[in-house]
Amino acid sequence: MENRHEQLAELFLQGREDEAVAFIDELLNEHPRLYLYEDIITPAMYHVGVLWETNEITVADEHLATAICDYVVSRLDDRFTEKESNNDKAGNKVLLLGVEKEQHYLGLKMVAGFYREMGWHVRYLGPNLPIDHAIDQINRWRPDVIGISAALSYRLPAVKQFAHRFSQLEWKPAILIGGRITRKFDLLDFISDRIYVIRGLNDLSRLHNQRGEEIIDETS
Amino acid sequence: MIYHVYTIKGEKRSLMRQVEHFFPLPFIRIDKHYNIQCYSPEMAELTRLSANLLDLLDEGSISKVQKGIIPSVPKTKMEVNLNAVDYGDAPILIDLFANWINDLQADIILMEKGEGIRGISDSLQQLRTRLQATNFELLEEKDKLQKSIEINNRLSAPFIELTEETALIPLFGDISVEKLYAIESNTLDAVQQTGIDCVLFDFTAVGELNGDGVHVLQKLVQSIIYMGVEVAVVGIKPSQAKRINELGASMDIRHIGSLQQAIKQFCN
């Protein structure tokens, strides 16, 4: 069946959270979680954005869809954490945050789910984090990987500032830059030996499959 | 009247002037390239003005306006986001009403969305932030708790040398997998380093016996035997004896009723 993401977007917009959960649960029988994040949920929310842009829905509708989507993603995450909490592989740690003033956070939340599924310790700090708060948390917890997310082009200076500060940490964590900003800009200037630009969860998954060793090696 | 002349790349692009319009509302008149021809004082208060409507818009709204406000659609109502006065702040949500008076000019009224929606979206965000903080505090507490359980586990089986030949390991609390894993390697190391001949596991302070925990304990006992050391279990209570039987975990080792008897036997 095609346009499954549009069907899901419709459930989000109508505020039918139980049906949205059932819809996802059913797909989960046949597909990996990564597929749901990347090919169903993310496109569903992009579709909501398009509907606003074509003047078919209002910002209030968008807020409702976001809240329902948040619920669905949290539920999805929860089901797996219970099952896999014993699977604490090597104790790798990832810390995720959105730059200051950034309000988009669903992507980050899905990245948190992705890492939990791999058995990592995850700290998801949410969006709109002042840099000093972030540094404070990071110094205390010493993650192996730090994920930064941003959506809009005027967050570029903040992303640059965050990435720069994090790259000076003495234990050299890997720094991932993600979010919709990476689909609009190539961000080649940002890339260095410890900074990676991630265009979506498939990209992240590939990075871990192909270069997973390199990502955590330096810190251990 | 106030006139603004904008010069872009040496070319005079737009002549924008403020008019005292009859509506007390943010108002602009644009041409078909979205250049602002005139605006009301209320418009100047709403946002930082620029010569072109598209420059006022948040990046997510630009193509929406380009697709929706066109002469072939005489009247349009839509939501758009205007850039905040401070760059990087949350954009201002606007209800925009456009009316083409001819193919070349459109009148546009921009009304800031009522406080209502802003209030709702702010409180949603606060709720989210609070949930986030709570979640985070819970995680930190969980970490702390896990660490103290681990320490507790490791301290639940001290290795006490009674004589040169005999050591006593009093076990404390419930026999669980986590606890046994936590003490396993320390115990084996101690057995090897001290070179003792006999280990007494004292069950006097033991509570519940967890099936998997007992299984790991059996393996630990077996490992100690492989190291050529005798093992005896001391002070098993009747309920625990029954439980061990139920679990089918009987160990082929010496059992002694009380610590007193054990010390008499092994320490003389």
Image: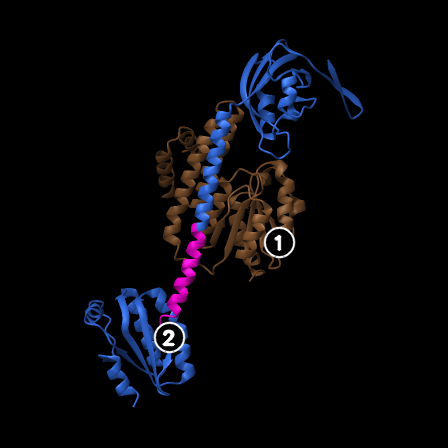
Identity of the residue drawn at 63% across and 36% down: A154
Across and down, in percent, residue A140 comes to: 54, 56
Where residue B158 is drawn, which disc sits there?
A: 2
Query: The N terminus of chain B lies in which quarter of the figure?
Result: top right
Identity of the residue drawn at 47% across and 27% down: A60
What amino acid type is highlighted by mark number 1? Arg
Across and down, in percent, residue B110 comes to: 58, 19
Q: Is residue A21 visible?
A: yes
Q: Is residue B155 magenta?
A: yes
In the image, residue B150 sits, relative to residue A155, either above or below, namely below
Q: Is residue A148 magenta?
A: no
Q: Which chain is brown?
A: A
In the image, residue A201 sits, relative to residue A45, either above or below, namely below
> Separation of disc 2 and disc 1 at Cα?
45 Å
Query: The C terminus of chain B lies in which quarter of the figure?
Result: bottom left
Question: How would you rate the neighbour count of disc 2 (Cα within 10 Å): few for under 14, some for 14-19, many for 20 or more?
Answer: some
The front one of B106 and B132 is B132
Across and down, in percent, residue B115 comes to: 51, 25
What amino acid type is highlighted by mark number 2? Pro
Please name the residue that numbered disc 1 is placed on. A194
Task: Give the main secondary structure, helix, strand or loop, of the magenta stretch.
Answer: helix
The reply to whether callout 2 and callout 1 are in contact (CB within 8 Å) is no
The front one of B104 and B233 is B233
Q: Is residue A186 visible?
A: no
The front one of A87 and B137 is B137
**Which-is-in-front pick, marks 2 and 1?**
2
Where does the magenta region start and end? B138-157
In the image, residue B222 sits, relative to residue A130, either above or below, namely below
Q: Is residue B22 left or right of residue B133?
A: right
